[in-house]
C-alpha cells in the first residue's frame, strides 16, 4: 500500500524544523547504509547520534502518532528514530530496497522494517527533481509532496530518489515494524476500517457497523504479531 498522509506537521512546525536544520552539521549519507546502498547513495544526512537529530525525531514521531489515518494504515508496533536527509544539485539515491532489519537503541533492539516513511520538509516548488519513485506491481509511482506531508509504502518496494537538479530537498525518513507483517493483510484491514468509518458517518451506528467492527478486530487479533 502506497498512502499519502497530509499535514502531519503544521506549517509552524515545518518552518521551525527547517530553521534548526539550516545550520546543522550534515555528514555523508552513506554512513547509515550497507554496501549496496552506499554504491548508489549520494546525499547528506544529519548524524544519528546528534542531540538535534533525536530532538527533531521526537517531534516527527509525536506528530505521526496523532494522525488517525497513519495509525489505521500502518498499525505500528515499533518505530526507528527518524533520520534527516538533504539533497542538493547532483545528489541522488539510486534504485534500492531498504534493509530488512534495523538495530536501534541501547542495548540494540532489532526492528523489522515493514513500512518505510518519507516526510517532506521543503515545498515542492523550491527544488527541481528529487521525486521519490516507488516501484510496485502496478509500475513506478513518483511522489513529491507539500512540506509537512508524508508518504508511507512497503519496505519491500524497490525505490529511489531522483537526482535533484536545483534547490534543496530535505526530508525526514523512518521505518516501522507493524503489528501486521503482511502488506496485503494490512491493506485489507485498512480498507475495512475506512469502509466502517464511511458507513458510520452515513448511517450512524447500526447493527451492520457493529458486526463489521467485530470482524475487523477479530481479523486484527488473528493476524497481529505482538
Image (spheres, rainbow, N blue to C red):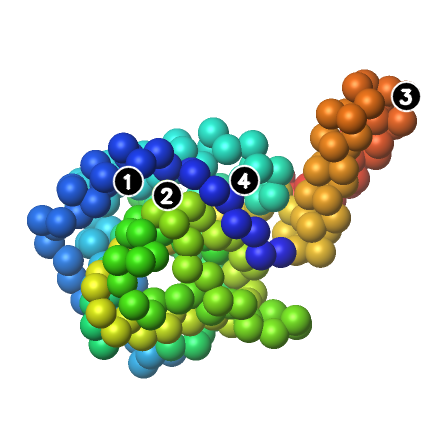
Q: Badge 2 local density, few (<14 within 10 Å), some, or many (20+)?
A: many
3 or 2: tag closer to the N-terminus: 2
Disc 3 versus disc 2: distance between alpha carbons? Answer: 39 Å
2 or 4: tag closer to the N-terminus: 4
Q: Is residue 91 visible?
A: no
3 or 4: tag closer to the N-terminus: 4
In the foreground, 56 or 3: 3
- Res. 148 mark: 2
Residue most extreme to the top? 205
- Label 1 sits on a secondary structure element that is helix
139 lies left or right of 17:
right
Read off the residue under disc 4.
Answer: 70
Disc 2 versus disc 4: distance between alpha carbons? Answer: 14 Å
- Label 4 sits on a secondary structure element that is helix
4 or 1: tag closer to the N-terminus: 1
Q: Percent from the top left, x then y, of residue 187?
A: 69, 50
- Label 2 sits on a secondary structure element that is loop
Q: Quadrant of residue 205?
A: top right
Read off the residue under disc 1.
Answer: 14
What residue lies at 44% left-to-right and 48% top-to-bottom? 150
Amino acid at each position: 500500500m502506497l498512502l499519502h498522509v497530509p499535514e502531519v506537521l503544521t506549517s509552524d512546525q515545518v518552518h521551525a524544523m527547517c530553521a534548526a536544520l539550516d545550520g546543522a552539521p550534515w555528514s555523508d549519507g552513506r554512513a547509515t547504509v550497507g554496501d549496496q546502498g552506499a554504491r548508489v547513495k549520494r546525499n547528506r544526512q544529519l548524524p544519528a547520534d546528534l542531540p538535534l537529530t533525536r530532538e527533531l525525531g521526537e517531534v516527527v514521531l509525536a506528530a505521526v502518532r496523532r494522525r488517525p489515518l497513519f495509525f489505521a494504515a500502518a498499525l505500528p508496533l515499533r518505530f526507528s528514530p527518524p533520520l534527516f536527509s538533504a539533497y542538493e544539485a547532483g545528489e541522488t539515491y539510486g534504485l534500492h530496497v531498504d534493509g530488512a532489519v534495523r538495530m536501534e537503541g541501547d542495548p540494540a533492539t532489532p526492528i523489522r522494517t515493514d513500512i518505510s516513511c518519507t516526510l517532506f520538509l521543503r515545498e515542492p516548488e523550491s527544488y527541481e527533481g528529487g521525486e521519490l519513485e516507488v516501484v510496485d506491481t502496478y509500475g513506478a509511482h513518483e511522489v513529491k509532496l507539500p512540506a509537512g506531508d508524508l508518504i508511507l509504502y512497503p519496505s519491500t518496494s524497490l525505490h529511489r530518489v531522483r537526482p535533484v537538479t536545483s534547490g534543496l530537498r530535505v526530508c525526514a525518513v523512518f521505518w516501522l515494524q507493524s503489528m501486521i507483517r503482511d502488506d496485503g493483510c494490512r491493506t485489507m484491514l485498512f480498507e475495512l476500517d475506512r469502509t466502517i468509518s464511511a458507513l458510520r458517518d452515513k448511517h450512524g451506528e447500526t447493527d451492520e457497523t457493529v458486526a463489521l467492527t467485530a470482524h475487523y478486530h477479530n481479523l486484527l487479533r488473528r493476524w497481529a504479531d505482538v
